[in-house]
Amino acid sequence: MRLLNTQTLEFVEVVRPQRTKYAILSHTWGEEEVSLQDLHKPESKQLHGYKKIEGCCAQAHRDGYDYVWIDTCCIDKKSSAELSEAINSMYNWYYWATECYVYLSDVSIDTKDSLGWSRWFTRGWTLQELLASENISYFDQHWRYIGNKGDLAGPISILAGIEEKYIRHRAIIHTASVAARMSWASGRETNRPEDEAYCLMGLFDVNMPLLYGEGSFKAFQRLQHEIIKVSEDESLFAWHDSTSAHQIGIFAPHPSAFCGCGDIEPVEDPRIQRMPYSITNRGLPISATYQTVPFEQLQGLSHSWSGVDPGISECLLLPLRCARKVWSNGVFTDSRHNPERLITIILAPVSGHHDNVFSRCLSGETLVYEEYFQPNEKLRHQNIYIRPPSGRVQEPWYHMS
């Protein structure tokens, strides 16, 4: 890890940053940012990015820090190996920092309520910086102190769409469901398409190689593949995407598909038993507990069933081991005592494949099991594969950059 001396603005290499006292900067990138190669060039001192670095170093020095880490100048972005290491390590770097300075270049304490208009709450990378950092101090565009993470936890919770307990206590972030954590990122944007997935690696404690050029869709698919290697939380499959009614796979195309999923939590149901699963060339194998339902009964749920084989007579209702929290007396309670509230997805056979290969359809809907549960219909058990229909998967048209 490369740190910046707060007095000399010289770089120092640190092998074990978790044993080093340092401050770290969280900000949004703007024009005239200063890179590692340009930091010590005389002409760089006139740039807005250099003044931001100076301001951060000055604040850190006043607070007793000899070192600070700033992403614009402490990473050699010309080295793909160093960039990959930095992105895979970044959550830890913010976690280990003694203090995080959030610099809000578009906020002035002279303007009431300007905090809520800051771009900082809309960017993908700042999500992990908010959640990983234990101690955060917020500053406006003139480096005037606004408040700390504890003081502002309430407003930040509202602006970020994250329950306040996760803002205050980073140790419990891993207890939030996968769907909830994805929902925190659902409205955020990044400059590079692939970063929409890469910026979430730390939030799920996974690592993967960076492949810039693969596009946001493939990057987000790979992220979800990594998540299922370490988690049995089926809320990962409880997304909804109203932009498509085609048959698709079981993985979400984009973080925005988890918008509105913040209240979904894992639940245990003795009727549903799963064997461990991992991606294969046929799809995702699942030991499915399901009911069948006539295709005609579901047609009214969507304006379009394009991509579904018109010759099919029935679909599968596959309940997931997750449900929405129950709102009672002004607070959320768990759903474990109401197992029929399980989130359910619809599967249809994939034409041209084996009888046990299915794809998800009606992607704009996640159903509540009790609404389509047939009391006289026994639950069936079968090992199935879930995959997209054959053919090249295209990048979603609504890609956010």
Image (tube, rainbow, N blue to C red):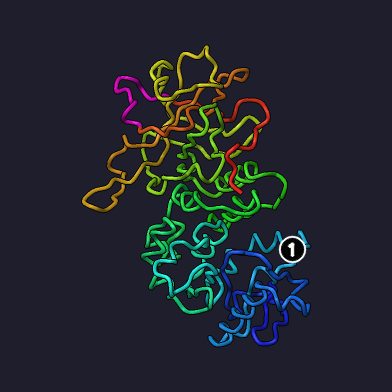
Position of the N terminus by quadrant: bottom right
Measuring from the top left, give residue 385's x and y in whole percent.
Answer: 56, 29
Relative to residue 311, is residue 11 drawn left or right? right
Measuring from the top left, give residue 139's x and y in whole percent.
Answer: 50, 75
Looking at the image, the residue that sits furthest to the front is 111
**Is 89 placed above or below 252 here?**
below
Viewer-side residue, 289 vs 83: 83
Which residue is rendered at x = 57% and y = 67% of the image?
Answer: 27
Which residue is rendered at x = 31% and y = 38% of the image?
Answer: 339
User: The magenta stretch spans which residues?
Assistant: 369-380
Which residue is rendered at x = 56% and y = 83% of the image?
Answer: 59
Total numbered badges shown on the rendered structure: 1
Measuring from the top left, give residue 272's x and y in whole percent.
Answer: 40, 35
Callout 1: 10 Å neighbours few (<14), some, many (20+)?
some
Which SS class for mark 1?
loop
Magenta stretch encompasses residue 374: yes
**Is 379 placed above or below 121 here?**
above
**Is 184 placed above or below 317 here?**
below
Viewer-side residue, 385 vs 177: 177
Q: Which residue is mark 1?
A: 77
Name the image quarter holding residue 40. bottom right
Name the image quarter holding residue 314. top left
Which residue is rendered at x = 64% and y = 77% of the image?
Answer: 51
Relative to residue 366, is residue 219 drawn left or right? right
**Three-letter amino acid code at disc 1?**
Lys
